[in-house]
Image: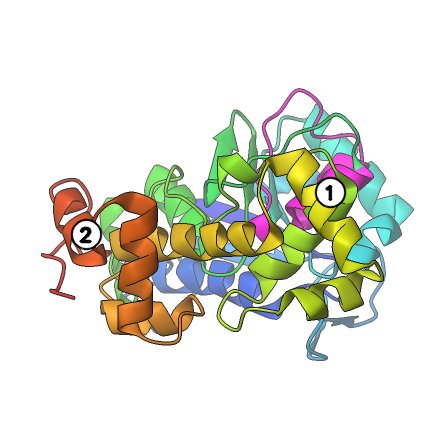
Amino acid sequence: MARLNIGFILARRFTLSAFANFVDVLRLAADEGDRSRPIHCSWRVIAPEREAIRSSCGVAVQPDEPLGDPARFDYLVVVGGLVDEVENLHPDTARFLARAAAAGVPLVGVCTGAFALHRAGLMRGYRVCVSWFHHEDFLERFDGLEPVSDQIFVVDRDRLTCSGGVSSAHLAAFIVERHLGRARAAKSLHIMIIDEAMAAEKPQPGLPLALATGDPLVRKALRAMQQSIDAPLSIGRVVARLGVGRRKLERHFRDALGMTPLEADRLIRIEQAKHLLMTTRRSATQIAADTGFCDLPHLIRAFRASEGVTPEAFRRAGAGTDGGTDGGPAPRV
């Protein structure tokens, strides 16, 4: 028997990269080199039916075995994907997960897998991690619940949730380290060209706290701005997308946030630039392009006006505590 046994439940139109990142950490930790023998870890895709499960990109995965007894697994991982499929969790799968929870099997929600667990009534009283990209989708579906969208993953007793993407590799590495040791977790990440394991508290790039609001129209506009951060939308395109007039949008922003939509958009991009300066080794020129500034001088002017320092000074001031994802000195900008 492997020392770590994990069952995967794939939602319809699941995110393939989140699933693959998680599995590859297990695969590389399970054997010497990358020979892929499931010696120290084993993993199975389980489902109530034998039909292949199609991912959001169209690639299908064939289940290995039926649901069966949940106690045969050390963890059950629900991999979500498109938000519209959250409501379509198979009733047998929901009952299976409830049996697993009653038996004390830890449940893991990857990407919108956290939505599926919550919809099944299995996240009450637990903290839940949701990608900033799906933060508003979660709030719209689950009234009165505030998900965590400023961390890459959350471990709360026997519920583990992550924001998806590469964070699924870091959550898998956390589980591998817990059961098989740090060396095997580090080996998996190094082979996957991930410099080092990231702690759960590592931040996601999210909306600044100054932009927190209950106004639905403003929240939709902010989400549109954040989702196009590298190629900012004009306010004309934002109002066209939302189907409202410009004056109405500006009035809502003024009442809800005390600023114009343009000022909010600039704040979002400055906060993203700060995040990249502190968590990556990208040059400030590249960060300017990544955050929708036309060139480096434009970023420097906007950054100094907002923060009182240049991007270089900001990165240098934080280098003693963070300094880039590989632990080395941050580059000059």
* The magenta stretch spans residue 134: yes
Q: Is residue 96 visible?
A: no
Dividing the picture into quadrants, the one containing residue 26 is bottom left
Circle 2 residue: 315
Assign a secondary structure to mark 1: helix
Q: Which residues are magenta?
A: 112-141
- Residue at horizontal 70 percent and vertical 28 percent from the top: 145
Circle 1 residue: 252
| Outermost residue to the right | 91
Q: Residues within 10 Å of mark 1 (few under 14, many from 20)?
A: some
Q: What colouring method underlies this structural image? A: rainbow
Q: Is residue 223 visible?
A: yes
* The magenta stretch spans residue 41: no
Q: Is residue 2 left or right of residue 275?
A: right
Label 2 is placed on what type of residue?
A: Arg
Label 1 is placed on what type of residue?
A: His
Reply above or below: 295 against 97. Answer: below
